[in-house]
Amino acid sequence: MAKSPEVEHPNKALGWAARDTSGILSPFNFSRRATGEKDVKFKVLYCGICHSDLHMILNEWGMTTYPLIPGHEIVGVVTEVGSKVQKFKVGDKVGVGCMVGACLSCDSCTNHLENYCHKTILTYGAKYYDGTSTYGGYSDTMVSDEHFVIRIPENLPLDSSAPLLCAGITVYSPLRFYGLDKPGMHVGVVGLGGLGHVAVKFAKAMGVKVTVISTSPNKKKEAMEHLGADSFLVSKDQDQMQAAQGIMDGIIDTVSAQHPLLPLIGLLKTQGKLVMVGAPEKPLELPVFPLIMARKLLGGSCIGGMKETQEMMDFAAKHNIKADIEVISIDYVNTAMERLQKADVRYRFVIDIANTLKSNA
């Protein structure tokens, strides 16, 4: 018979878990495995709230197993390392993002694309090699194989670097892979939320001209004055969209709600690229004719491999790129989820785990 989460591993741990599709999170006692020879154990200080956490606690993707401890934007300080760990030592600032395992032998893994491995193990809501459930970062402690641990550079604050482990790499990787990182290029960013706001920052740091494309005219000042976008398009304004036809080398589309692709494809130059990183629940309608007539490309991208994630974090440190965050206590997390559903956050909630988890549980 399977052991309960509280006793299946030797090290006691405390987190906040959802028990059912209500998605309500509450204190949950569980356990972490003993630190293996290649493992890094760290005290969790902060954990970002990603939109996928909301989808998962509500089982909107139909793959959730309860109890579920979400969180894959996890940062903290190393407290123990295994005997064969080479990259980290006690006291180091580290993070864990969306995955904690992969086969490490397939074509994807050998090309540093562990995120596309068919045996990727997600940081929470998955089964680890030993058959036990993986639990995320809404918890006081974390253990991970060092391969899946990221070093956080000294000059990056832990709280505002946490969202880079998911939101940051999600936009950095397609900018690099699709060649939308060349100075002087013109790139559009659709949606100014958790993903979109860091996409603007990374693209600007690469020397790219950035246009934010949004349904909300009231975000123009924020996009241009605060985030440094070069221009702003209201996607509902047909005159604005018509005037911008054929001017962009590429577009990073971060929107996870239903929205038409045709107007976005129209903004692209010949051979332009529209890259999807938001994940709408229902299929979008794809007009093929405008793709054919101008050899345009529609692509996708999902986070990044470990090597590229470290590269992204180092780039962020060099260019002082941080997420814009609202730090919250763990007992505010259910309210934060309600606000996230209404897109009422600028632009990422981050839970202060170290100072609030124990006192409220």
Image (cartoon, helix red, strand yellow):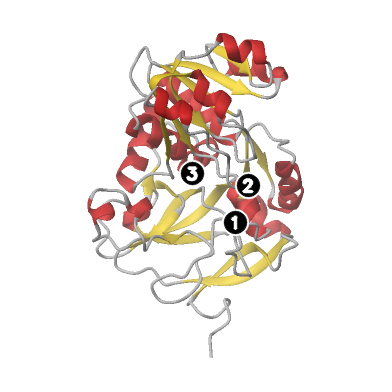
Q: In this image, 348 relative to 288: left or right? A: right
> Which residue in the structure is indicated by mark 2?
351
Q: Give the quadrant of residue 81.
A: bottom left
Q: Give the quadrant of residue 239.
A: top right
| CB contact under 8 Å: marks 1 and 3 | no
As drawn, the label of residue 165 is none
Q: CA distance from mark 1 to mark 3?
A: 15 Å
> Which residue in the structure is indicated by mark 3?
166
Q: Is residue 133 visible?
A: yes
Q: In this image, 330 relative to 179: left or right? A: right
Q: Amino acid type of disc 2?
A: Ile
Question: At which x and y percent is residue 319?
Answer: 40, 23
Q: Is residue 320 visible?
A: no
98 versus 214 height, above or below: below
Marks 3, 2: nearer the viewer = 3
| CB contact under 8 Å: marks 1 and 2 | yes
Which one is in front, 154 or 120? 120
Question: At which x and y percent is residue 146?
Answer: 33, 57
Q: Residue at x 35, y 33 (%)?
A: 314
285 versus 89 height, above or below: above
> Which residue in the structure is indicated by mark 1?
138
Q: Amino acid type of disc 1?
A: Tyr
Task: Name which of mark 3 and mark 2 comes first in the sequence.
Answer: 3
Q: CA distance from mark 1 to mark 2?
A: 8 Å
Q: Amino acid type of disc 3?
A: Cys
